[in-house]
Image (cartoon, rainbow, N blue to C red):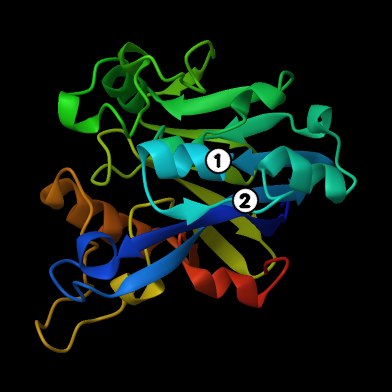
Amino acid sequence: MINYTIRPICTGYQLLDKGWYATFRRGHGEIIEHPVFAFLIEGDGRKILVDTGMSDTGRSQKYHHEGRQDPGQAIHEQLESLGIGLDEIEIIIFTHLHWDHCYNIEKFSRAKLYLSEREYRFALNPIPFYMKSYEHPTLGIGCPWEACKFNLIKDEEEIVEGIRAFQTPGHSPGHMAVTVQTEKGIYVLAGDLVFLKENLEPDQETGWPFYPPGRFYNILELWHSIEDVKRRADYVMLTHDPSHFEQEIYP
């Protein structure tokens, strides 16, 4: 059995209203500085990324949210500062194609790219409400994934031994999560399925087994995807949860 390690890499920050994004109808007006993590998985001589993070500050503020990417924070810059060549990244698994998860994808010319087929089909032809989220080519603002060739996943797939991608729709139509075998059990990298670890905790006020985020396209699919992640995971890691600053490498 192969055990991997996981390194969270913060590629920037977004300032988001808690009630609109993190906790459904609760916390409106409270602005949270959410980190935007990508994750480096290492083990068995492999280096694998889950997502590539957000754009630079100017683009984020012009087209998306208040936030920032500090100098040297782009994913390729951080890997190079760790002494990791971009050609050493052999696989990138995308949880989904929203703009803050796929920037600088073109820097990784040797990597095999994995994505949900359902996500790809929707990203090619989203409803107008979601065009900015995907930076759809018809907007004329540039699109980081437009020229990319993806290995498309229909259901669930073992990418390499000990690492699996599976469907977790709800935040977006083809959202995926990734299971990683570690010496301490199964870590699930859950992307934007939820925004904070408190989403996964029982809620005393409602009696719900967990409390959903405020940002979703389909609450029924989201609910069942959260149930699935909780069944599979010994530990859950999220793209926007600040608690991942507590440790450099997991487990």
Residue that badge 1 annotates: 51
Image coordinates for residue 181, horizontal then vertical, percent? 62, 55
Q: What residue is rendered at 33% in x and 60% in y? A: 194
Q: What residue is rendered at 16% in x and 24% in y? A: 127
Residue 57 visible within the image: yes
Image coordinates for residue 106, horizontal then vertical, percent? 64, 22
Specify the quadrant that holds the C terminus: bottom right
Image position of 27 with respect to 22: above or below: below
Residue that badge 2 annotates: 39
Relative to residue 136, is residue 191 drawn left or right? right
Neighbourhood count class around disc 2 (C-alpha, 10 Å): few under 14, some 14–19, many 20 upward: many
Picture disc at residue 131: none
Image coordinates for residue 178, horizontal then vertical, percent? 50, 46
Q: Are marks 2 and 1 in contact (CB under 8 Å)?
A: yes
Q: Secondary structure at mark 1?
A: loop
Neighbourhood count class around disc 1 (C-alpha, 10 Å): few under 14, some 14–19, many 20 upward: many
Relative to residue 220, is residue 86 drawn left or right? right
Q: Quadrant of residue 175?
A: top left
Image coordinates for residue 85, horizontal then vertical, percent? 86, 35
Residue 189 visible within the image: no
Q: What residue is rendered at 64% in x and 70% in y? A: 184
Outermost right residue: 83
Q: Amino acid at mark 1?
A: Asp
